[in-house]
Image (cartoon, rainbow, N blue to C red):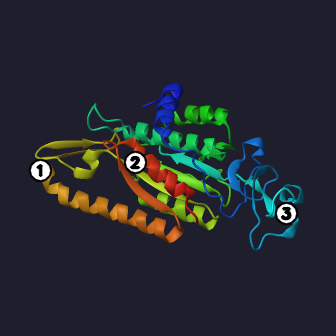
Amino acid sequence: MSEAPARLRAEAEAQAAPLPPLMAEAQHLAATVILGEHGRRRAGMGANFWQYRPAQAGDDARMIDWRRSGRADTAFVQDKEWQTAQTVMVWVDRGRAMGFASTPQLPAKGHRARVLALACAILLVRGGERVGLGGQDGLPPRRGPMMLDRLAMALGTDQAEDYVAPDTTGMPARSRALFVSDFLGDPAPTLRAVAEAADRGIKGAMLQVLDPQEEAFPFEGRTIFESMGGTFRHETLKAGELRGRYLERLAERKARLRDLARATGWMFSTHHTDEAATGALLWLHTALERRA
């Protein structure tokens, strides 16, 4: 399921193109950088001039630009550009189970997850944010186009295990995080990772990517279930009788993830690979820019 970095980035750029640059809210700033001449166009505590505006009640007298005010009957102050950038750490499940696609017409879960994560990173970088890759083989957070190339290269590698749990290694305290996975493996490591992240002031979003077949369980009669890595194999003659139990367990898993997100200040959503990727990217846009 290895992805060519150039093709992966090209598809991610196409997904990101219709959306405005993502300006993630800089909440509880612990890891920030100065944006220099590319500062975000929003009033804040920077040093670069943005615009004049009429003085308002509560403005400090030291903010008044007397030279500009002398040319009018109204006092004017200078707004400065906001010059802090949020650090957003991305973790994408690259386990072998993510290689599943029920039909050749659908993308594999892992491919869709990587494209969405990289498209989100493109929006973040365009907005002046620092982006990094979490995990043992992660990338320290940086900004700029070269970081997108490095991220695409890293996301193009697979991991040997069928199911991989989120890894918060390298994620700075009080940053934001994005976890993209099917979350169908053992839930305990995921619950632990999000709880540990929340304890360090990290807030973020979990996006579950599923194939529509995994959501509907349309099997009947004799069926052989086998994991992508070949470590699990189960044959049944009455697959239809398993549907109720399977759907119940899937609903319970989603409920646990939603409860975890609610308890830790994160957000959770499910995306299916037969849906347009734009909707999921819009959700990520909102989830990562929301106020804490």
Looking at the image, residue 83 sits to the left or right of residue 215; the answer is: right
At x 48%, y 61%, the residue is 267
User: Compared to 136, does 249 lie above or below?
Assistant: below
Mark 1 residue type: Lys
Report, in whole angstroms, how far the alpha carbon at label 3 lies from the one at label 2. Answer: 44 Å
Q: Earlier in the sequence, mark 1 or mark 3?
A: 3
Q: Is residue 4 above or below residue 272?
A: above
Q: Which type of secondary structure does the marked residue at label 3 adopt?
A: loop
Q: Which residue in the protein does label 2 denote?
A: 279
Number of marks drawn: 3
| Point 15% across, 50% down: residue | 239
What distance separates the C-alpha of mark 1 from that of mark 2? Answer: 36 Å
Residue drawn at point x = 37 percent, y = 50 percent = 271
Q: CA distance from mark 1 to mark 3?
A: 78 Å
If you read the primary sequence from the N terminus, does the residue marked by circle 1 or circle 2 appear first?
1
User: In the drawing, does residue 224 fall left or right of residue 51?
Assistant: left
Under mark 2, the amino acid is Gly
Q: Is residue 189 left or right of residue 102?
A: right
Quadrant of the frame with the C terminus: bottom right
Q: Nearer the viewer, residue 118 or 65?
A: 65
Circle 2 residues within 10 Å: few <14, some 14–19, many ≥20? few
The residue where tag 3 is placed is: 64
Residue at x-position 53% and y-position 36%: 155
* Residue type, numbered disc 3: Ile
Q: In the figure, residue 278 lies in which quadrant?
A: top left
Which callout, 3 or 2, points at the residue further toward the start of the chain? Answer: 3
The image position of residue 80, as x and y in percent, is 77, 55
Q: Secondary structure at mark 2?
A: helix
- Quick check: 132 left or right of 257? right
Q: Which mark is residue 238?
A: 1
